[in-house]
Image (cartoon, helix red, strand yellow):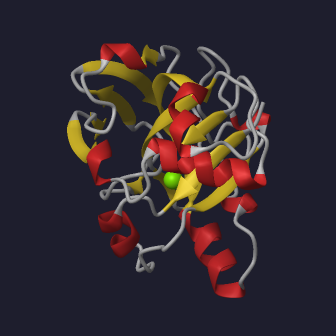
Amino acid sequence: MKIICIGRNYAKHAKELGSAIPKEPVFFMKPDSARLPKKAPFFYPNFTKDLHYEVEIVLKINKLGKNISKKFAHTYYEEIGLGIDFTARDLQQECKEKGLPWEKAKAFDYSAPMSQEFIKKSEFKDINNIDFSLTKNNEVVQVGNTEDMLFSFDNLIVYLSQFLTLKIGDYIFTGTPAGVGPVVIGDHLEGYIGERKMIDLKIK
Ligand code: MG
């Protein structure tokens, strides 16, 4: 299983980090060890002093594919979940400045908690119009809607599959909206798709 993450897929988020609006998708990977096991606690890693949350809609790949055409892209994912792309922002900044890869800041153990529940696409009226949000200690910190994505789910599948074979059980984190920010030990994060609570995570 691999986790593919899209960066800068929401214009306002790209701007808040001072990044240019990309002309094609930006992606990076997290290994399978980035997944937080079911019911496992999340511990603040000791190598960062600026851990940020990024709430993202996650696609679960249900079919093996390579060089997928736009017409069939929608058949490669049937379920949609929610995830947090935890980022050591201080390390990422350092990597960016030195022109180095981001893995240290993005791919560490348990950096990709995901909802247990994934929702069937058929339950949504329009998957290109899904509201999602994140609260920290009961205050809304991020609100997004998939219609604001620079690259739609289908376009991401087409693009990524030029480079990577998509396999059953892979995940795609589709990018975070504006409002990313730091967490400290004791914080409580809750993620929602629409009104449905998908993620409940305490920082230990
Ligand atoms: Mg992200």
Residue 96 visible somewhere in the drawing: yes
Q: Is residue 137 above or below residue 89?
A: above
- Can you say which quadrant of the picture contains the N terminus? top right
Q: Quadrant of residue 17?
A: bottom left
Q: Where residue 186 appears, x then y in whole percent?
A: 43, 36
Q: How many marks?
A: 0
Residue 48 visible somewhere in the drawing: no
**Point 70% across, 58% down: residue:** 47
**Point 35% across, 30% down: residue:** 191
Q: Nearer the viewer, residue 100 or 161?
A: 161
* Name of the residue lying farthest toward the bottom: 98
Q: Where residue 123 appears, x then y in whole percent?
A: 32, 13
Q: Nearer the viewer, residue 71 or 166?
A: 71
Query: Does residue 164 appear left or right of residue 88 in this picture?
Result: right
Query: Does residue 183 appear left or right of residue 137 in this picture?
Result: right
Query: Does residue 50 appear left or right of residue 140 in this picture?
Result: right
**Point 64% across, 68% down: residue:** 91
Q: Quadrant of residue 63?
A: top right
Q: Nearer the viewer, residue 6 or 49?
A: 6
Q: Where residue 57 appears, x then y in whole percent?
A: 43, 37
Q: Nearer the viewer, residue 77 or 174?
A: 77
**Point 53% across, 32% down: residue:** 59
